[in-house]
Image (cartoon, coloured by chain):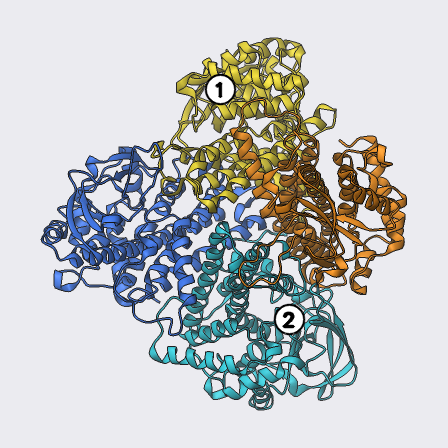
Chain colours: A orange, B yellow, C cyan, D blue
């Protein structure tokens, strides 16, 4: 049951995004071939969105990641195309670094002037013949991406505009971040690594929440369609085979949301990384499962671009791939769980500072 | 459970764990089936003496008024320790129902023996012609003075041949809507005119039975609620039941099988094991969420059908993974210890077929969700 | 294909492979979508010149009368070589239909241009109010002398904006059963009164369109079969269509994606890759079995609905595996080459959503199977 | 389309098994706690069942494994409890060995006097603490089990009565075969290994066929039930959600049967081992999938032992576990397929003699 703060935040997010045009913005950006709407970004910044988790001492709201779960669901429900979650994770990361370089970046990020995102480790070890040794993927339209170089334990600030890119199915662009001459060293060592891994955890939790919001709304759209669309003289929602599939998706959506909320409660404990990965694994897989069948339940119109349901599927693919695919996240969770099972009671001590090796690769 | 525990909760867990390590009799540990009541009643009574037999009962009725978190701690530790599955019809079903619909006399008479483990209850709903469609039931009771006289035939009665009492739905009127004219009745199974026949299930256990009623006389004081108003009473029971049907009790037991088989896994199965852990963690979160809402006064209503589907299909999915892990021994009925882990899941796999059939089949639950929660209109017939 | 090939079949395979290696233009190789007809007609014509455009057509009509095995060899080699997907409405649908139901004049006029690749056909069945339920169609044709005058609106017409001709179902009578009074009509899309509007699909391609008819005059000689008897003609077409809808064409293309991504797999994905190979091998066997029975004179009938379900869901399952293999690049729309393999499956994944919707949705196919093959009685309404 | 020989064989199998009591035999054996009915076994032997694949020069029928596919389906349809498939595979194996020990065993097997089975390699490497180093599993009620010891390339004749055993869910008993002082050396070297692997292939193909017959019959029983059983005033087969699931199972059954037949055609070629494994993998997985839902579609009666459908599920578990689980067989097939894809044209040369390393472990 969400607290008042959570509910207020979520309502404000919904209001702002609906006021800006709702789902139509996702379509418009796709049609325009990507690019960030800086005016919208500034309004989001002015509402304090990106400093939700920044400690109050640094001028932020000092909220816990779990306070932002409902907020992120509202973003997902409207498939807002901005990298909000990555920006939210960046500010506490920079604050934790405490280096002059980090402070400078934090100042640039604070007012929304610069779009600064944490880019979770997705190092691709390409093997022989590879032209690329990447650190991470980031949205291409941000100003600064923060990526971590595990072997050297260095947190780097990189300019995605300098990177190789590829379009994504939601109309966005992905930059493949690599170390290079333009990289700026932000911080290094174990504490930088711990702060970066915590930022990854935040992203996994909030992307999971975004996916929950997305699939819940997609299912609602599908149920609306099933109540209206008629075939064989009846609404298609009257057909039991479709009813039972819709019920299965309802179970998926509800259960995933409960898991994501529960994972939020693990933040600040030893279980944080495992819980965040569990939430992201479950939400990514459930969203793909549900969305594929939402298309099918819509029939031909679901396959047409003019209906929004296809935008939801494409956004789900992007979010499911962000900050760890379902498989990657299951592996992180599985490793964390196995370690827990080997540990003696009490299982639930407050989390010790320090990096979680399972996530560094 | 992913959330951190309070100091009190952690202490409770340690307490439970220590108790279970000492108190579970060896011959009841790690069973993969529901042992017959006569075997596990000593364990039931041990839990009862410790005050942990009725976690979700309010203190006023002798329960422990456990929070949802404490309930999950109990279930996690019981699964981990290999505690046997106890008869739950009294604790989970008729007990809570009597708290809401029973007369003070009914409560005073029936609740204490349930807590003490002195009386075993069974549920008399299903009939040969009325399975998922309970409104079609035909076991009838006619009024005769201060008594109802019952004739008919119940089936699929779990532990019916070991139970002392049955709570049953019987038809007291055949006028009007098939859901009207049904009465909720408490039947003493030692009454004359009752014949019981055990039914073997596909796992080869006599877990359920048929019960035949021939002019069985039941005092009117054993009606719960009013005569002809049993459908309402039973439906409320079904809704409450579903919350406990959604507890991760079986799923955690299944997961324990997976964990014990994990040393047999090759690299290709690591993802499947993580899937099992994730599925049970998801169910646990869903149960906590629903139980907390219920505790806060929300009506579980039809929506809680989702928990029953989730809990039962999670258990089955986890046992499919256990089957993969067991490899060529997946069909062994005897427990087999080849290396370190004990391969012992085929009976649980077979028993788990029941989960999606009983307690309102999952097909019925999906139809309830679709019609009452999702607003999908049923076909005109 | 698991069976051994005869010497002639092996030689045919080598021949096909050599031809494909040389003949597929680079810009058409390895496409993950169906290229617009104007792009791929040169390739269509190249296949036509080689005599391989109509594998399953009889020799009498200019086909190659290929055995099922030869058809599979062609499909396997085309997928392996990355050959583009060609428009198939002429080859697979209206062509075979005209061979059975067309007049000699219709056959002489329409079959040679299909073979030559000079005329592109599209199918005009679906309407905004008649998707899975074709009997609800409302596009109407009224008799006026030697002509039918068509008014109405077709939708989801694959390549309708690139096609020269449409075969359509139109309503010529509204009396009686909704399936009566439908006529099967060949419509020249250059006729006055036709407006076409492309529809973008979820993969961002203009693959289909809407077609509006406003007083479009069609000579009576373009009716296939008799006026008002179109349902029978079209249903026969649907049955035949299903055999080709069950060919492993798309599934093999999807499998090729999996094979190319396989070097990215860790040990945990080896089983998934084997699953993909096994699923496509199963489909291939099912297609061979059905095609051989069909070739031997068995009527595919309603039972062949199973092939359509199998083929489309196999393709989708294989692309789910490709998605797992692509890892963090599963959402990349642009092909990405990071290491050796090219990651390039998201468009095919999106396009594949269509497969279970079009050609009679898989829900319809399941109902057909249940009612006509499995003898499960439909609910009275 | 089955040939006349195949159809005759299959019809004769059905007649004999129906005459002996059909499915009731499986129940009776289960109730009796296992054990082989030697009288039935002798009648099967008298019909030539176990020498179907034995070369004519040795007094057998000299048929190809594919000729026995329909035959094995009929056995599966009636869930006959005898180890028919393992016995069929044993005779050509012994004939191929050509050693005096093999000839002696073949003579004992021929008349049905001795029950001799090939036991596919299921070597369990138990790791530390294991008390058992097994070679294979075999039905406990056979007289002689032929097992292969890969490191030493020795084909051994073992007495299951001397082995550790465990009951199986169908009421049978499984013996864990291990090398020991009572083992008789039957043959050794590369040719013995090749003959043994070929016997494994035969078992995989015919177990797959047995599973096809089993699931087809189980689905028929389920469809019968769906047409008869009424709920809510209608036969349950009228409910669309159940109809669509039944249709899905029909697809599974038909497609698996086609694959198994197709795999039979690969015998004698390089693809034999991969094809046999593919058939077994698909049939094992499909049978478990279909049978689990057949139980569910039967509802409460499906969970009761008095209905035969539960016997079918239990037999499916045993057959799916025999001669390689679905996962094991997928691995064999996947490895074979990967090797094929690397090989140049022609892909389909006649199979070279020699062991297939993928199966030896």
Q: Chain of mark 1?
A: B
Q: Dot 1 surroundings within 10 Å: few (below 14), some, or many (20 or more)?
A: some
- Can I make out residue C110 in this image? yes
| Along the line of sight, the residue nearer the viewer: D72 or C34 | C34
Question: Chain ID for label 2?
Answer: C
- Around disc 2, counting alpha carbons within 10 Å, would you say few (fewer than 14), some (14 to 19), or many (20 or more)? some
Across and down, in percent, residue C207 comes to: 69, 71
Q: Mark 1–mark 2 contact, CB under 8 Å?
A: no
Q: Quadrant of residue B100?
A: top right
Q: Secondary structure at mark 1?
A: strand
Screen quadrant of the N terminus of chain C: bottom left
Q: Secondary structure at mark 2?
A: loop
* Residue wearing tag 2: C180
Pick the residue in front: B140 or A187.
A187
When the figure is inspected, residue A307 is found, relative to residue C50, above or below; the finding is above
Q: Which residue is mark 1?
A: B215
Q: Quadrant of residue B331?
A: top left
- Residues flagged by tags 1 and 2 on a common chain: no
Question: Is D350 left or right of B237, judged from the image as shown?
Answer: left
Q: Give the Cα distance between marks 1 and 2.
A: 60 Å
Q: Does residue B33 appear left or right of residue C214 in this picture? A: left
């Amino acid at each position: 049951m969400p607290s008042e703060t959570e509910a207020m935040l979520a309502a404000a997010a919904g209001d702002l995004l609906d006021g800006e045009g709702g789902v139509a913005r996702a379509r418009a950006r796709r049609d325009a071939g990507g690019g960030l709407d800086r005016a919208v970004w500034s309004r989001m910044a002015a509402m304090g969105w990106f400093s939700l988790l920044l400690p109050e001492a640094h001028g932020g709201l000092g909220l816990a990641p779990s306070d932002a779960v409902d907020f992120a669901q509202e973003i997902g429900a409207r498939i807002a195309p901005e990298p909000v979650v990555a920006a939210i994770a960046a500010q506490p990361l920079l604050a934790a670094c405490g280096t002059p370089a980090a402070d400078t970046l934090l100042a640039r990020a604070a007012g929304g002037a610069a779009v600064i995102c944490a880019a979770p480790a997705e190092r691709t070890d390409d093997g022989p013949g590879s032209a690329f040794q990447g650190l991470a993927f980031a949205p291409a339209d941000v100003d600064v991406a923060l990526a971590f170089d595990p072997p050297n334990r260095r947190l780097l600030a990189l300019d995605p505009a300098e990177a190789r890119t590829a379009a994504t199915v939601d109309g966005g662009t992905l930059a493949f971040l690599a170390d290079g001459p333009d990289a700026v060293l932000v911080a290094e060592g174990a504490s930088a690594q711990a702060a970066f891994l915590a930022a990854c955890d935040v992203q996994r939790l909030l992307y999971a929440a975004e996916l929950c919001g997305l699939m819940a709304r997609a299912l609602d759209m599908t149920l609306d369609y099933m109540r209206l669309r008629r075939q064989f003289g009846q609404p298609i929602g009257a057909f039991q085979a479709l009813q039972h599939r819709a019920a299965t998706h309802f179970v998926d959506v509800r259960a995933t949301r409960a898991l994501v909320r529960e994972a939020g409660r693990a933040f600040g404990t030893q279980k944080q990384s495992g819980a965040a990965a569990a939430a992201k694994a479950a939400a990514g897989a459930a969203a793909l499962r549900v969305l594929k069948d939402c298309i099918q339940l819509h029939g031909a119109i679901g396959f047409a671009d003019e209906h929004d349901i296809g935008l939801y599927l494409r956004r789900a693919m992007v979010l499911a791939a962000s900050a760890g695919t379902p498989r990657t996240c299951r592996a992180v969770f599985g490793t964390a769980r196995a370690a827990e099972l080997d540990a003696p009671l009490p299982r639930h001590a407050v989390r010790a500072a320090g990096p979680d090796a399972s996530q560094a690769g | 459970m992913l959330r951190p525990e309070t100091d009190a909760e952690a202490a409770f867990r340690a307490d439970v764990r220590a108790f279970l390590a000492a108190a579970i009799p060896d011959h009841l540990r790690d069973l993969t089936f529901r042992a017959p009541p006569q075997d596990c009643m000593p364990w039931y009574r041990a839990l009862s003496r410790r005050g942990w037999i009725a976690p979700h009962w309010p203190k006023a009725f002798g329960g422990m008024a456990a929070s949802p978190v404490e309930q999950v701690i109990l279930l996690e530790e019981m699964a981990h320790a290999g505690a046997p599955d106890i008869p739950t019809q009294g604790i989970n079903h008729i007990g809570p129902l009597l708290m809401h619909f029973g007369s003070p006399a009914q409560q005073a008479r029936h609740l204490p023996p349930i807590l003490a483990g002195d009386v075993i209850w069974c549920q008399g709903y299903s009939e040969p012609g009325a399975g998922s469609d309970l409104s079609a039931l035909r076991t009838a009771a006619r009024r005769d003075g201060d008594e109802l006289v019952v004739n008919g035939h119940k089936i699929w009665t779990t532990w019916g041949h070991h139970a002392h009492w049955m709570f049953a739905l019987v038809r007291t009127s055949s006028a009007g809507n098939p859901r009207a004219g049904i009465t909720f009745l408490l039947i003493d199974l030692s009454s004359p005119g009752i014949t019981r026949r055990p039914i073997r299930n596909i796992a080869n256990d006599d877990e359920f039975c048929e019960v035949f009623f021939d002019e069985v006389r039941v005092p009117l004081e054993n009606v719960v609620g009013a005569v002809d108003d049993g459908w309402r009473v039973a439906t409320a029971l079904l809704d409450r039941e579903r919350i406990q049907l959604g507890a991760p009790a079986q799923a955690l037991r299944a997961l324990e099988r997976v964990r014990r088989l994990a040393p047999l896994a090759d690299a290709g199965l690591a993802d499947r094991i993580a899937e099992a852990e994730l599925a049970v963690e998801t169910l646990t979160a869903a149960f906590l969420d629903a139980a907390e809402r219920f505790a806060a006064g929300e009506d579980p209503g039809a929506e809680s059908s989702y928990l029953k589907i989730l809990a039962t299909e999670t258990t089955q999915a986890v046992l499919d993974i256990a089957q993969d892990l067991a490899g060529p021994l997946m069909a062994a009925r005897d427990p087999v210890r080849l290396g370190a882990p004990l391969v012992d899941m085929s009976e649980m796999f077979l028993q788990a077929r029941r989960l999606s059939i009983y307690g309102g089949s999952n097909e019925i639950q999906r139809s309830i969700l679709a019609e009452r929660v999702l607003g999908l209109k049923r076909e005109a017939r």
